Image: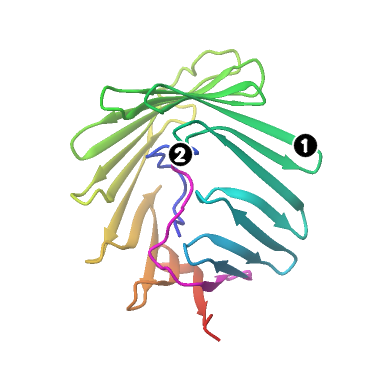
Amino acid sequence: MHLHSQVWQYPYSTIDNDYSKENLDKTLMKIWSIDSSQYNVTKVLYEYGINGRLLREFYSNDTIIYTYDEFGYKLKRQSSLMGDTFYKYIRDSNNLIINKLEVHDLDTSIVTYKRDLRGNLIEILVNSQLRKKFEYNQENKMTVVKEFLNENYALSTINSYEFKKDTVMIEICPYALNGERYRWPCEKRIGIFDSLENLIELKEIYYNGNDEPDEFKTNYVYDKSNRQISSISDHYGRKEEIRNHYNQNGQLLFVEILHDETISRVFRFEIEDTQH
């Protein structure tokens, strides 16, 4: 579980890498997630299959059931509150997805994935409207992602990736509706990795319409088993820390969120015995 804000977009999430098909734990598992703050307590029960895929979610007002194909891609999302959503995938001769159909009620969405000769995604279209374009370097690493708005193919954002030995820098440049880039400098995310490819430091540089940047830094700490045990951020002089606590088997027991060293929120995970 990753509670840090989703500012780090590397590797860039696509249909080729956005599905967790395998899990180190090969046993059936039911986990209670208990979200506690000073204002509220929320409990959700998650049930996982033997390959780590989420099968069911039980909320106080809803039950959600998932089914998958043999590749681990979602075929159906059945919700007692929101109804059913169906998914269908069309693959090429290399088993790479080139179309995804999503049907909910009477609405059908068709996503088209265009690829180069190496199988890399180069364009994503939704109902024939261009949404994203991708570029790669000679090492086959994604270097540019261009995002487009729904109407008139207006350019929305360009994400550029620069790779060095232990560092990945992402430059994020937003565009106005008229297609012109905003006058202030592009935002940057600079990630530093250790020898095990763990993210150990993230520097974020924002402008928010100003010429002077706002800079934030987050440091990540791992234990000897390569599990992330904490992240510490400093935002506008306010310290935020996330602490992960595991049992002897390496299962996550609870997560604490602290602001200025005071616990503000706790996520607890209680594993049910599925053998009885």
Most distant residue in the right direction: 106
Would residue 253 be found to the left or right of residue 151 on screen? left
Q: Is residue 261 above or below residue 140?
A: below
The residue positioned 26% from the left and 22% from the top of the image is 138
The residue positioned 30% from the left and 23% from the top of the image is 137
At label 2, which amino acid type do we have? Asp
Disc number placed over residue 16 in the picture, else none: 2
Image quarter in which the N terminus is found: bottom left
Q: Nearer the viewer, residue 10 or 234?
A: 10
Query: Where's residue 29, x and y in %?
Result: 51, 72
Give neighbour class at mark 1: few <14, some 14-19, many 20+ (Cα, 10 Å): few
Q: Does residue 28 belong to the magenta stretch?
A: yes
Q: Is residue 49 above or below residue 98?
A: below
Q: Nearer the viewer, residue 259 or 134?
A: 134
Disc number placed over residue 107 in the picture, else none: 1
Q: Does residue 49 belong to the magenta stretch?
A: no
The residue positioned 34% from the left and 76% from the top of the image is 249
Q: Real-space Cα distance between discs 2 and 1?
A: 24 Å
- The residue stretch that appears in magenta: 16-43
The residue positioned 41% from the left and 28% from the top of the image is 119
Q: Secondary structure at mark 2?
A: loop
Give neighbour class at mark 2: few <14, some 14-19, many 20+ (Cα, 10 Å): few
